[in-house]
Image (cartoon, helix red, strand yellow):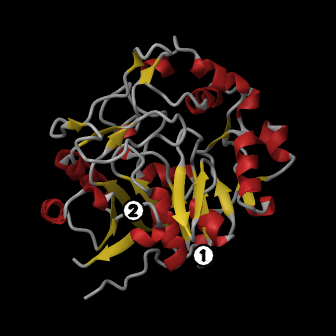
């Protein structure tokens, strides 16, 4: 019997997050959610070091700041205190996708990416280069905020205050009033600075459900459920190379029960990152990572993407091995880049 439980519980705050190293298809699943269970408000703690993509109705949407569900639903968007914002990128996204800036609220203490933030990361001699960072300025912006630089937060950024409402939005009150809220969290658990696989090959903040709630200042009593995305063959960003092709920054290890592959091994065209256009590294599925993430996040909904990279018997074997470790209430499979390629799996 098909599961008819709503993807987003009414009047609750739910979190969409990634259980691996990013690029699992959060954007696609956010678009699927928007079609089948549209939220009243979307919020995010995103930064431009991660892109979110959805292919819907023949149109490709790629955002770095704006939550995909909010763009598609035309409902209020809140860039919360955990966001790290490049003002130019945010303005470009609003213009490109016709997002009414009146619907966008930015927390006063969201971090601001300045030209200085970017330049600090883009030197090949920087720490950011050595860990194969996307060098977008997100980590440096967060560091500047922690060091209390006056220009490091949204309330002191004229480019943001001139175009957007910069104010605190009380999502606790919104949930208490019956609003359904979705948090779209960027990147993946395996990259978290506290919980990720390998320091310093990680991002600049924690990638967990509690962190998502904390950044949006939401009390746990309003929490609804966790929706987590995975992929059949996890990826990591490619190593950073100089103009001669020499590796100058390692992007970090896969879990010990994974085997790194080539795209030719999978008979697939190489994937490239949304931001840097580097060819991604790819590996076999890690059940060790899966068990660790499930124990930490306990998601009610799982989306397993890139099912089309597997033969039918291989896919079914993978699913059954996953279910022996942890069984969600709902499971969805992604067989391609379009939202219409997403199918529910009967548990």
The 10 Å Cα crowd at callout 1, few under 14, some 14 to 19, many 20 or more, is: some
Q: Residue furthest bottom?
A: 1
The residue at which mark 1 appears reads as 179
At 22% from the left and 42% from the top, the residue drawn is 265
Question: Going by the image, does 337 lie left or right of 48?
Answer: left
Residue 185 position (above or below residue 135): below
At 39% from the left and 62% from the top, the residue drawn is 336
The residue at which mark 2 appears reads as 336
In primary-sequence order, the first of circles 2 and 1 is 1
Query: On residue 198, which mark appears?
Result: none
Residue 168 position (above or below residue 188): below
- Residue 45 screen position, x and y as percent: 57, 48
Element type where label 2 sits in the image: loop
Residue 19, can we see it? yes
The 10 Å Cα crowd at callout 2, few under 14, some 14 to 19, many 20 or more, is: some
Residue 223, can we see it? no
- Residue 129 versus residue 59: which sits nearer the camera? 59
- Residue 301 screen position, x and y as percent: 34, 68
Q: Residue furthest top?
A: 125
């Amino acid at each position: 019997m098909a599961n008819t439980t709503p993807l987003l519980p009414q009047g609750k705050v739910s979190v969409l997050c990634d259980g691996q190293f990013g690029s699992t298809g959060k954007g696609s699943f956010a678009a699927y959610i928007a079609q089948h269970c549209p939220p009243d408000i979307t919020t995010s703690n995103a930064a431009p070091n991660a892109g979110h993509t959805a292919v819907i109705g023949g149109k490709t949407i790629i955002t770095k700041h704006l939550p995909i569900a909010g763009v598609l639903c035309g409902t209020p968007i809140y860039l919360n205190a955990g966001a790290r914002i490049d003002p130019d990128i945010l303005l470009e996204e609003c213009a490109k996708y016709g997002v009414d800036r009146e619907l966008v609220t930015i927390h006063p203490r969201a971090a601001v990416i300045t030209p200085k933030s970017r330049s600090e990361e883009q030197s090949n001699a920087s720490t950011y280069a050595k860990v194969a960072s996307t060098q977008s300025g997100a980590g440096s912006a967060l560091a500047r905020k922690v060091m209390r630089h006056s220009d490091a937060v949204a309330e002191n950024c004229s480019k943001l205050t001139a175009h957007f409402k910069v104010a605190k939005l009380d999502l606790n009150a919104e949930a208490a009033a019956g609003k359904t809220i979705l948090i779209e969290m960027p990147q993946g658990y395996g990259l978290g600075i506290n919980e990720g696989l390998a320091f310093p090959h990680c991002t600049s903040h924690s990638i967990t459900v509690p962190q998502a709630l904390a950044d949006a200042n939401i009390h746990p009593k309003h929490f609804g459920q966790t929706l987590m995305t995975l992929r059949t063959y996890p990826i990591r960003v490619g190593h950073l190379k100089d103009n001669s092709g020499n590796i100058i920054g390692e992007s970090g290890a896969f879990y010990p029960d994974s085997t790194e592959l080539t795209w030719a091994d999978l008979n697939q065209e190489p994937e490239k990152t949304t931001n840097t256009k580097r060819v991604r590294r790819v590996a076999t599925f890690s059940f060790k990572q899966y068990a660790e993430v499930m124990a930490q996040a306990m998601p009610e909904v799982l989306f397993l993407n890139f099912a089309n990279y597997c033969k039918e018997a291989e896919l079914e074997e993978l699913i059954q091995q996953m279910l022996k470790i942890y069984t969600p209430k709902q499971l969805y499979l992604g067989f391609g880049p379009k939202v219409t390629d997403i199918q529910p799996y009967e548990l």
